[in-house]
Amino acid sequence: MSNINGKVYAMNAITPMKPWKTWVLRLIFFVLGHVKSLQQDLINLSFIEFARWVVVPRAGFPQFGNGQEPEKLTYDYLLFFSNFNGTWNQYIDAFSAVLSKGLNLIWQWSEKFPGSVPVTLFKEYIGRVQFDTDYYFTAYPHATANDLKAAHAVQASYDDLRSRVNSLSDAEFADAYMSFVLQVQPNLGETGEAPVVF
Amino acid sequence: MSKLNETDIQGFVLRGYNLPYGRYILLRFENPDRARALVSKLLPIITTGQRWDNGKPQSTVNIGFTHRGLAALALPDATLLSFPVEFQQGMKKRADILGDTGLNAPARWDDVWHGNDVHAWLGINGLTATALDDCCSQLRSLFAETRGAVELAAQDAVSNMVDGQQTGKEHFGYTDGFGNPDYLGIERNSQPGHGKQLPDGSWAPLATGELLLGYADEAGELPAAPIPHILASNGTFMVYRKLHQNLATFRSFLDEQSAVYGGGREKLAAKLIGRWRDGTPLELAPDAPDPSIVKDPQRSTNFTYGADGAGTRCPIGAHMRRAHPRDAFGFNGKLIDRRRITRRGQTYGRFVPEGELASDAEERGVVFMVLNANISRQFEFVQQQWIEYGNDAKQGNDKDPLMGNHGGHGKFVVQGDRSATNPPLVCAHLPSFVELRGGDYFFIPSMTALGMIAMKLVDPR
Ligand code: HEM
């Protein structure tokens, strides 16, 4: 049981919200979801593979029957789930440094949220509301999101070159090959072991 | 922010002395009382940050302690346990984190680091070799008189000279010492490219707390520090690493690769670092060195990488672009403002000009010293994530071409264009050009803190 699988870290955080606040957050999510530019900063953090917030309403928890009593919950919950590359500290530092406004907008409705700045209190909070991953499947533990994007770029360029290669004269091939190299040259990093977690 | 209390801060923290001769003495304390007596005697000799109105002094002395050294001085346990963990552990125990494995593993370090005996570091610099020796004899008589410490080793360092003139050149032939951060309150001419970049593109000094304990850092917080706070304030942490340079390997690499590289030998050398060997930044002058830029502080560090995303001027994996990425990761550099380090390096070993025979086996390299308020967030992060790894730069597991611990398996891509003199190049099977020969983490206390240590006045609360 670990939050880490190769180069990827899975973070789960669950925070309680007073039900009336959930409606405010839903409205915010609606706006964020429809204005793509507001998501841009999150998307530009290239070490984040995935990040999502979901409201779990107090009536939304599963009921399995078989005598399981319905729980009486007084709070709704906000689930945050993210997969990222790099260290836990680096991730939260970056969140706090460049996304603090957006994070506050989303998390301030949760109980006892201290704000995403100063970062130490924010880290303490996340540490408290985080729960560990029981099962973690990663298709490419030796690759980061950047590595995968780079591999796709190289593959696409290569496929393109290959599809044309038979119809090219030697001179044309030399030119096409040069174009191929220039296209792939920023994307040639190795994959491999992740640095030791610290 | 008002001026700092310069007389309370060790001089070495506030400025690089740029004195040509250096000696780094490593000490072991035998007995806490006698060690404290030695610290008392050293107090009036330590060089503070006070300005030198009458020119440079003949020599300077500074001091730092390992965690074991502070324990040997019998600081209270509550204080010792309040230091950040990486400092408590020391550099050797952090080897896996730092990538100090294989050729750089502690087992291969100089003998002095094999035990756990290094308690203190004395950094001595001199204007002349004689001034350095005189100062060291004075210190050695204090060791003898107080019987406070045993000298374990002394590492000599000397700036490389060309025609009898001190140069800023390190052994590979690059001019070093352009880029170091500016901090608020430190009286020093601020230079574009030294501090942090603001959204409007201008440069401002970093928060003082990125260098000194007891001041707000870039996150608006006080850096993690030992208790009592007065022991910590105006102090900092130093990373000491003796980095051996394989000069023969480096030169034959340049010979071999430049035979197939259209840009030629000097351009290839420049691509590894991000500056031509005279110091001209590739971002400002990708085709040829320009001495007028090197001489002009308004320009020599005033550049960014944002417009060179493809790396065709300065390769994405070049040393300087990794170690201080400026705006390369977007967000106006906000992701890197808390990963800055202050460098205080000095070369050791004989300088061998190009064209003369050099061997890897000769003692030669850089005594690489880094000052930072938080070793783990600053130095260790840079070393692990940016020197020994490349994901933030989108270079996967590729390491710093020159500083990486390659052991024959390194790779470096020189991004290029269609011109004959700037073609793309992939260098594979890179050897280790630089190897670690030892080092440790040191606490560099303020003058007040040194006095407290000497007088046994450190109370945890
Ligand atoms: C033998 C070892 C090394 C040599 C010869 C070396 C050489 C250089 C040179 C020539 C420069 C460019 C000059 C300048 O901008 O000041 C430079 C810059 C720099 N190096 Fe190194 N370096 C070494 C090791 C390291 C290591 C291990 C680190 C980090 C852990 C590091 C961090 C930096 C930083 C932060 C800069 C400044 C970049 C800037 O501000 O733009 N260096 N180095």
Image (cartoon, rainbow, N blue to C red):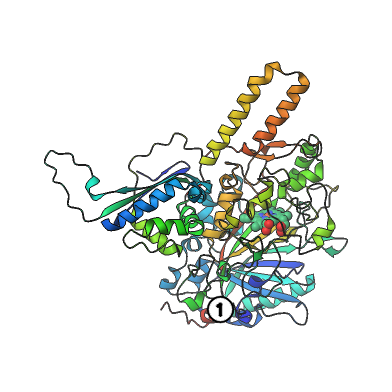
Q: Is residue B107 visible?
A: no
Between B284 and B233, the one lying in front of the other is B284
Q: Is residue B37 visible?
A: yes
Q: Quadrant of the C terminus of chain B?
A: bottom left
Query: What residue lies at 78% left-to-right and 54% top-to-bottom?
Result: B280
Snapshot quadrant of residue B398: top right
Query: What residue lies at 74% left-to-right and 68% top-to-bottom?
Result: B18
Spot occupied by residue A132 in the image (x, y as percentages of width and height): 34, 48
Spot occupied by residue B199 in the image (x, y as percentages of width and height): 61, 60
Q: Is residue B85 left or right of residue A20?
A: right
Q: Secondary structure at mark 1?
A: helix
Output the chain of dot 1: B
The image shows residue B307, relative to residue B66, as above or below, that is: above
Q: Is residue A85 left or right of residue B15?
A: left
Q: Is mark 1 within 8 Å of ligand 1?
A: no
Between A174 and B446, the one lying in front of the other is A174
Snapshot quadrant of residue B265: top right
Q: Quadrant of the N terminus of chain B?
A: bottom right
Which residue is labeled 1 in the image?
B450
Dividing the image into four equal quarters, which quarter contains ligand 1?
Answer: bottom right
Q: Residues within 10 Å of mark 1 (few under 14, many from 20)?
A: many
Between A116 and B64, the one lying in front of the other is A116
Spot occupied by residue B277 in the image (x, y as percentages of width and height): 79, 52
Q: Amino acid at mark 1?
A: Leu
